[in-house]
Image (tube, rainbow, N blue to C red):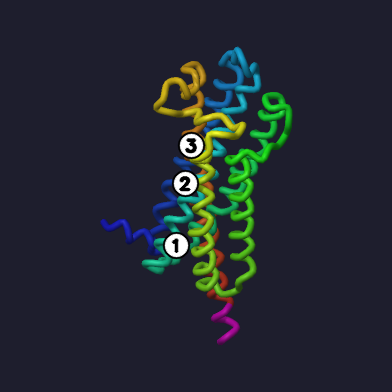
């Protein structure tokens, strides 16, 4: 079976209907276990105190904010190259989810930053690039709504997605590109000195798995909705022309 067969809306709807309950259930299980484990069964950090536990929301949300845009980039490239409508609709479906993760990352970062830095906001390279990424998400969503023709909207938003990918990459690697800045290094790293302490590591991985699965479930659900909406629009247009 070819991967491209699932670009057919009918095949996609059949596969997603089987996957969605399992993905949603696993996501819920991981989130419940990870968040309860992290917030109630891990100690306070000797430097950050109880504020360190914000990582169980902040790190997965920030990770998925970036990866959601990268998923949209891949889907947009598939649309540009292969003109598969499901890929364009999947990119559209992912945008509000990615924006929500970006907002969560910004808010939880501010909650963590106030006691650590003494301010709710700083024009740190990573924070600034994340804010710009949020603006790109909003622009992407607005462009889909503003352009009436679906194929034209998919073309324009795909170009916007290519441009915004620069800021998605900067959001991920800003700490490496610029040594100055308040933001700490990666919480998950191959460097043991930068990597989060072992006691926080496993519940954080469970939370990340929960966020990844939640993103997948929401994108599947929203893509199914987008396909149904397009089918309904096509039927209404046929009735008007009849």
- Residue 238 part of the magenta segment: yes
Q: Which mark is residue 176?
A: 3
The residue pinned by badge 1 equals 86
Side of 123 where 94 appears, left or right: left
Marks 2/1: CA distance? 16 Å
Residue that label 2 marks: 20
Residue under the point 65% across and 22% down: 51
Residue furthest to the bottom in view is 242
- Disc 3 or 2, which lies upstream in sequence? 2
Q: Position of residue 100 (x, y in %)?
A: 62, 46
How far apart marks 3 and 2 lie (CA) works out to 37 Å
> Dot 3: what SS?
helix
Q: Report the span colored magenta.
A: 237-242
Please state which of residues 92 and 186 is positioned toward the viewer in this rendering: 186
| Quadrant assignment, res 13 | bottom left
Q: Is residue 201 above or below residue 230?
A: above
**240 falls in the magenta region:** yes
By secondary structure, the bulk of the magenta-drawn segment is best described as: helix
Q: Is residue 62 left or right of residue 75?
A: right
């Amino acid at each position: 079976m070819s991967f491209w067969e699932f670009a057919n809306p009918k095949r996609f709807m059949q596969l997603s209907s089987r996957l969605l309950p399992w993905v949603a259930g696993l996501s819920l299980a991981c989130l419940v276990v990870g968040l309860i484990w992290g917030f109630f069964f891990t100690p306070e950090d000797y430097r950050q105190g109880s504020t360190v536990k914000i990582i169980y929301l902040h790190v997965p949300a920030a990770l998925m904010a970036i990866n959601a845009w990268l998923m949209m980039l891949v889907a947009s490239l598939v649309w540009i190259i292969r003109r598969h409508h499901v890929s364009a609709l999947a990119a559209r479906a992912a945008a509000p989810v990615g924006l929500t993760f970006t907002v969560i990352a910004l808010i939880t970062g501010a909650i963590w930053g106030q006691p650590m830095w003494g301010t709710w906001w700083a024009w740190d390279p990573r924070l600034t690039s994340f804010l710009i990424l949020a603006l790109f998400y909003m622009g992407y969503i607005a462009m889909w709504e503003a352009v009436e023709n679906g194929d034209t909207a998919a073309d324009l938003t795909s170009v916007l997605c290519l441009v915004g990918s620069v800021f998605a990459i900067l959001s991920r690697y800003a700490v490496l590109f610029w040594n100055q800045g308040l933001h700490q290094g990666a919480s998950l790293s191959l460097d043991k000195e930068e990597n989060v302490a072992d006691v926080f590591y496993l519940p954080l991985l469970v939370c990340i798995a929960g966020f990844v699965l939640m993103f997948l479930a929401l994108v599947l659900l929203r893509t199914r909705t987008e396909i149904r909406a397009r089918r309904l629009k096509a039927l209404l247009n046929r009735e008007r022309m009849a």
